[in-house]
Amino acid sequence: MTREENRSDRGLLRRLDFGDAVIFFYALAIIRQYFWILPHNRIAWLLSFAVAAVFIYFYVSTKQILAARCELSFWILLLPTLLFAYSLRVAFPDRSYDVWAYHLLNSDRSLHGPLSQRALVDGELDEER
């Protein structure tokens, strides 16, 4: 390996961040669907991984490097503030419509079987069991 290739690999590693890992796994999941036709699961996963690795290599090598990053003092100031603001909501449960109509009804249905038609229309639980 020459010095120029070694420098380009270090430059490529500097461009990697957490979002690139997320994109890699997202690409891996999508690419895997195209290899369902293969009879051997291991070969399909290996090919999916290889294609996703090639994809992420070209993505990272063509990605522009962000010049400005947040300093540590920014995160030291921001994280405790956000943690405090979000911790104020811990004592108050979520009472929005989707929680009552979807989550609670589906949990009751999973515990006690199907709901009646009236319960589905009115959005209430069937009390006549």
Image (cartoon, rainbow, N blue to C red):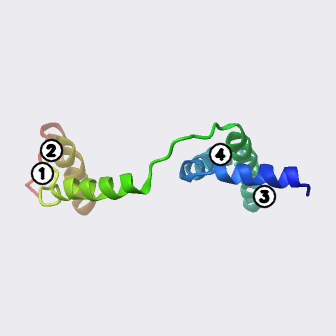
User: Considering only order in the chain, which callout, 1 or 4, is on the residue closer to the N terminus?
Assistant: 4
Q: Is mark 1 on a helix, strand or loop?
A: loop
Identify residue type, mark 3. Ile
Query: Label 2 belongs to which residue?
Result: 119
Q: Which quadrant is the N terminus positioned in?
A: bottom right
Residue 114 picture location, percent across and down: 25, 52
Q: Which of 32 and 107 is in front in this view?
A: 32
Which numbered mark, 4 or 1, is in the foreground of this view? 4
Q: Quadrant of residue 121?
A: top left
Q: Are marks 1 and 2 in contact (CB under 8 Å)?
A: yes
Query: Label 1 belongs to which residue?
Result: 126
Categorize mark 1 by other alpha carbons within 10 Å: few (<14), some (14-19), many (20+): some
Q: What element carries label 4?
A: helix
Q: Do the residues labelled 3 and 1 touch (CB within 8 Å)?
A: no
Identify residue type, mark 2. Ala
Cα gap from disc 3 to disc 1, whole angstroms: 50 Å
